[in-house]
Image (cartoon, coloured by chain):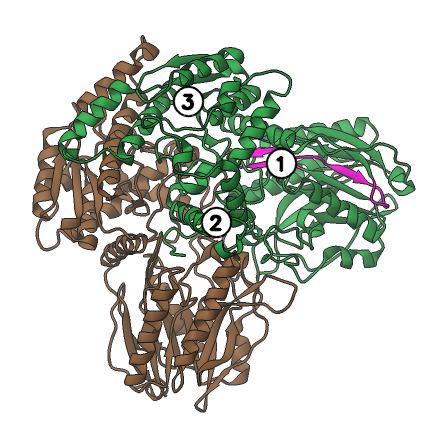
Chain colours: A green, B brown
Amino acid sequence: MKIALAQIDYHIGNFLENTTNIVLQIKRAQLESADLVIFSELSVSGYPPLDLLERKDFVEKCTKEVHKIARICKKIGVIIGAPSINSDPQGKLLFNSAYFLNRGEVKDIFHKTLLPTYDIFDEYRYFEPNNEFHLLEFKGKKIAVTICEDLWDDQPVESEFARRRLYKINPMDELIKQNPDLIVNIAASPYSHMRSKVKKSIFINKAKKYNLPIIYVNQVGAQTQLIFEGGSMAIDKKGKIIEQLKYFGIDFKIVDLNNLTKNITTTVFEEPDRIKMVHDALITGIKGYFKKMGFYKAVVGLSGGIDSAVTIVLAARALGSENVHALLMPSQYSSDHSISDSIDLANMIKMKFDILNIQKGFDTHLESLSKLFSGLKEDITEENLQSRIRAILLMAYSNKFGHILLNTSNKSESAVGYGTLYGDMSGGLSVLGDVYKSDVYELAKFINRKSDIIPVNIIEKPPSAELRPDQKDSDSLPDYETLDKILFEYIEKQKSPNEISEFDPDLVREIVRKVNMNEYKRFQTPPILRISSKAFGEGRRIPLVAKY
Amino acid sequence: MKIALAQIDYHIGNFLENTTNIVLQIKRAQLESADLVIFSELSVSGYPPLDLLERKDFVEKCTKEVHKIARICKKIGVIIGAPSINSDPQGKLLFNSAYFLNRGEVKDIFHKTLLPTYDIFDEYRYFEPNNEFHLLEFKGKKIAVTICEDLWDDQPVESEFARRRLYKINPMDELIKQNPDLIVNIAASPYSHMRSKVKKSIFINKAKKYNLPIIYVNQVGAQTQLIFEGGSMAIDKKGKIIEQLKYFGIDFKIVDLNNLTKNITTTVFEEPDRIKMVHDALITGIKGYFKKMGFYKAVVGLSGGIDSAVTIVLAARALGSENVHALLMPSQYSSDHSISDSIDLANMIKMKFDILNIQKGFDTHLESLSKLFSGLKEDITEENLQSRIRAILLMAYSNKFGHILLNTSNKSESAVGYGTLYGDMSGGLSVLGDVYKSDVYELAKFINRKSDIIPVNIIEKPPSAELRPDQKDSDSLPDYETLDKILFEYIEKQKSPNEISEFDPDLVREIVRKVNMNEYKRFQTPPILRISSKAFGEGRRIPLVAKY
């Protein structure tokens, strides 16, 4: 049996586009004599549809599209993902389902058993878990159809306190009893730089455990914060990867089931470098956001620092430098090199820029406030004011010319609240909000690996917000290497301050205090492109008023 | 048996304060010869602790506090709520539990069966559902201990598409087999003006169905967006309310189980007017946010419109007018009455205010941008600019004096995106973000029911953002009565545009389009005090990039 793996970038709720793309791939598979073509989880709607699943019109459209697609599947078998109605009047209204289409109609349906409800996943919010098991029979073969988490009964976890076994049932242990010839897994499995290797090992281990080949088809592209790397695979029954589809690109491959059972592999698929993957993920994230929001131009405030430099290079690579505009907005506290470095960078990537000095705006606002503030010392207020004036100018540019403002904050500063609400924390999309400062440096080095695209001075100078004379990040924060390690232990590994024992306890407590007291700022940040397993945003829900 | 209902305002994660309050109530109950005292769901930690439940130190602290409290329960029985560890290595790590404390130790434990995972609830994110049932036996009585949703097996719903029966099990149907004498329900059930009557009927119907008295103890106070109204009750076995505790206030009452079984009620508990409840809920929400964040002063921008007027009155009632400061920030487009009405209001509620004209700031920024914008027409950019300058001044005031900026946007304008990001959409807390404009008028009338606190002119003049000459809301929106009805059908009832048939189809489509295209703005709004069953924020999760 020849099986096509169709790895597509879906757009949530854009049924016309999704169905068109699905139909094109089916026709291509047919032309190339495939017997079966496989699409990813909830492919008809795009994943994750979130609360659109609570709308009758949305669910009805999904079903309608499934039947529309079925009509063209005369000679080929197709597995696609879409919600279906739970006919039991008790329990959640929907199932997360895989439909099997053949001979012009829906021939079979399989429901997801394990519903991830943690981190960014909310599937039990919408779906009833499956508890009945059967195989797909097609052309003399028996196929175990599983949906994403169904093969993740054993979870990889960062925190020692987190559960590895979140479910009381293992769907493959049920399905194996019926002697399948093949495991199919349709997925919408988002990228995390901490999970790339784990993800492969999950499938390899399942193939070995059940002595069965596995075909895994993942979604690719970005849906707001979530980036899907694709990387669909065909694995033989010994656990060897026979075929692997592109990372971060749409792709299509046909494999022969015979080759998967015969174990005749030779190719070795090497995992790209972690920073290259993060780089590509972020570009995919920017591209996806702009395309799906219907925009194509971005504006970025260039400060002369490394965060805005890396952001603008990524934006230029995602959108084309002709579609990215830089604003340089110096004040009296800006050093000369901030401007000259920024100009060098803009020239290097052939990008248009404007310089708007904020000094006069700053002075005018200070004058407006002078009566109220008379006799009071300068403090964080005046620093925030500068940051907010820059946001005003960037947003004015954004409004006037239809550019989306890209936010340049990194995860380290966002964690400790080193940023101004409605100032440098503004933007339509945060590019680096899930990238620790240490990794921002790694990204800069990666960008410069062949030649200096980002001026070396930007990378080498000590980080500064330049909001008061001679300010340095190190005035109020430890060096970023130390800071990032403490943050990782606290945020990703969820350790208590006492357990983060390799650092000065006072420093740890001070950092943790800053993380906790700045939840209110992070509540209002733009959507953050997620590249780790614990990004700020939907995947990390902390009560604002909590005292802990 | 004498049973005390202890209705407390908990602070999430503030174990010292929560335990102190719990112990005080236990001592009081003992002094008043109660046999049993009942606290609300997750009372030890405060509800909802959200992802703090993923932290080992947090869960350990909960358990430690439970045992600390148990030690003082020598002669009295106590039911309190806290998480407990699921000893089965499979399934979620925690249960949402009710602990029974007596004779100085934990004597029994009961786990929640029905875990709400919809709207603002995420309980299956953390908890394994219970599936074993037993009664609490104490002083010769058998008590069915249930936790909140356990009595809500049949859901009230707004949307026709939503499920009434979300669960396959009904815990009371299991517990009744063991012949209990009483049902206890410990709850953390948030307020919604659409659910007040339904909530009572749920308990009344359960009492009648099982022919058993019910004691319901709810949390009171606010946790960021969520407002808990309290209103704990004792209901006799015929379904009559024998005792009811305060709405929106801490309270303590003792009831005699004999009276609950004898059915000797005389008191009639009348439900307050809906708008009075909303008014009190919002004040509770403001109070709770400030107290729990450790702040006590607010700043509000007074525009001369009804939203800021209602917001500032509510703030003054919550915090005291001496702790609320108004900024009036006129521009060339502000009408004279906007200033004079605002001054009248500030004087009426004896509040300090400052007037800061934004014209010079506006001109300075326009000048900065003049080269970039040369030859281009004025548009929404210049309107947003004024709104953002006001936010800059308000935030400068907030930063300098430690006042939290209160946001004044209402639900109607937030729905259609009639607001400026980083402008009038700024603030630490949104007071009216879940109140449709029609209800803002109702609130103003309620505030003025005895005398004109809000100047009549503010209520009667046509709404305007005053961002360009002679602007009126009605230039771009239908009248608010029509708008709010359409929004309610689309947002709360989740109808499709075609199903909203009592209005002009073009108008409906245009409103729906505005709601959908402004998800990106709402993504960055402050936390919104929730008073309905479908507030913007955590309870409504729409993918930003969706096209639908």
Amino acid type shown at disc 3: Ser
Q: Is residue A541 above or below residue B3?
A: above
Q: Residues within 10 Å of mark 1 (few under 14, many from 20)?
A: many
Q: Alpha-carbon neighbours of circle 3 within 10 Å: few (<14), some, or many (≥20)? A: many
For label 3, the residue is A303
Vertical placement of B216 versus B286: above or below? below
Report, in whole angstroms, how far the alpha carbon at label 2 lies from the one at label 1: 38 Å
Of circles 3 and 1, the one toward us is: 3
Whole-percent x and y of residue B254?
Answer: 30, 81
Magenta extent? A219-240
Q: Return the residue found at the far bottom.
A: B140
Q: Which mark is residue A504?
A: 2
SS of the residue at dot 3? Answer: loop
The type of residue carrying mark 1 is Phe
Q: Is residue A228 magenta?
A: yes
- Provide residue A211's location: percent of width, then percent of height: 85, 50
Element class at badge 2: loop
User: Is residue A54 within the magenta segment?
Assistant: no
- Is A446 positioned to the left or the right of B316 in the image? right
Mark 2 to mark 3 CA distance (whole Å): 32 Å
The residue to which callout 1 is attached is A228
Question: Could you say which is closer to the camera, residue A24 or residue A287?
Answer: A287
User: What is the quadrant of residue A178 in the picture?
Assistant: bottom right
Disc 1 chain ID: A
First along the sequence among labels 2 and 3 = 3
Chain assignment, label 3: A
Lower sequence index among marks 2 and 1: 1
Q: Could you say whether the residue bearing mark 1 is in a helix, strand or loop?
A: strand
For the point 65% across and 57% down, the residue is A164
Of A441 and A521, nearer the camera is A441
Q: Nearer the viewer, mark 2 or mark 1?
A: 2
| Real-space Cα separation, disc 3 to disc 1, in angstroms | 31 Å
